Amino acid sequence: MVDSVLSMDAGVILKYLDLPVDYRPSPADKPVEFLTKHLNQLPPHLSSKFSAVLTPKQRTMVPAIRNRRLEYLKSNPTDLSFTHARHEWPNLWQGRERPGIEEGDEERQWANNNFLEGFDKHVKKLGTLLGGYEEEREAERVRNVRRQQRAVQEDEFVPEEDDSDSDEELPDQIETEAELKEAFERRIRELFIYGMLEGYDYDKVDWDEGLDVDNDRELEEKWFEEEDEE
C-alpha cells in the first residue's frame, strides 16, 4: 500500500534531493526512515505527500516532526488553548461547570451589544433567550460527544484478570478547578505531541519547514527530561 501510493512521487522526491533511484531507505518502502534522514531538506509540497501513507501517530517516530510540534507549542497556538481545546475535545475535560455556560454568555453579549443595540429593554430580553438556546445547544453537543466516547471505550474494553497489583495506591484526587485546568492542558499537549489528538490538522504543523530550529535535538531532549522530572 505504501509503495503504491508513494511510488509515483518517490522519483520526484529523490530527484529533488539529487539521490539515485535505488536509494535506501526508499521514500516509498521506508517512509519513516526516509523522513528521519531527509525531512529537513524537503519543501512542504513534497513532504506533505507522506500524509497519504503515514498517520499523525506514525509520524511521531520522526524526530524532526516531534521537534516541529514542540516548536509549535512554544508559540501558544490558539487552536490548542484551553478555551478552544475544551470546546473541541469536551470528552477530555473533567471540569465541574455545566457545559455551554461560556458559549451562552458569549451569545447573550453579542445579541445585546451588537444585534440588539439601540432597542428597548423589553426587546433586549431576546438576548437572554438566544443565550439560553446557545447554552443548551452546546451542552447537548458535549453530552453527545461524551456519550459517543463512552460507547467506543465500552466496545474496546477487555476485562483483565485480577492480580495482586490491583490494589495499588491511587494518586491524590485533583480537586480544584486550577488543577483540573492544568491537567487538561497538559493532556492536550501530550496527545498533540504524540499524534493522538483526534480530528486535529497535523499537516499544517508536521510539514511546516518554518518550525525547524538549529537546536532540534536539544529542544526534544529538554522536553522529555522535563517529562521525566514531573
Image (cartoon, grey):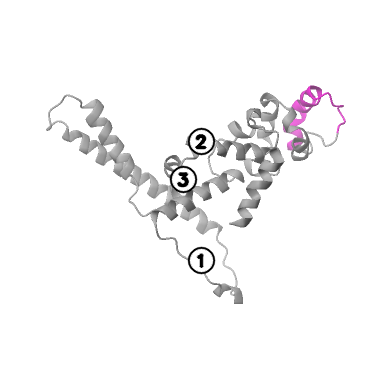
Left or right side of 90 for 230: right
Residue 164 picture location, percent across and down: 60, 77
Q: How crowded is mark 1: few (under 14 residues within 10 Å), some or many (20 or more)?
A: few
- Mark identifier at residue 171: 1
Whole-number angstrom distance, CA of label 3 to CA of label 2:
16 Å
Answer whether residue 206 is magenta in the image.
no
What kind of residue is marked 2? Pro
Residue 16 within the segment the image draws in magenta:
yes
Q: Which of 219 and 211 is in front in this view?
A: 219
Location of residue 219 in the rendering, given as x and y in whole percent from the top left corner: 66, 42
Q: Main secondary structure of the magenta part?
A: helix
Q: Is mark 2 on a helix, strand or loop?
A: loop
**Stretch in magenta:** 1-23
- Using a 10 Å C-alpha cutoff, classify the residue at mark 3 as few (fewer than 14 neighbours), some (14 to 19) or many (20 or more): some
Q: Name the residue under label 3.
A: 89
- First-in-chain label (2 vs 1): 2
Measured as percent of width and height from the top left, residue 207 is found at 65, 31
* Residue 70 screen position, x and y as percent: 61, 40
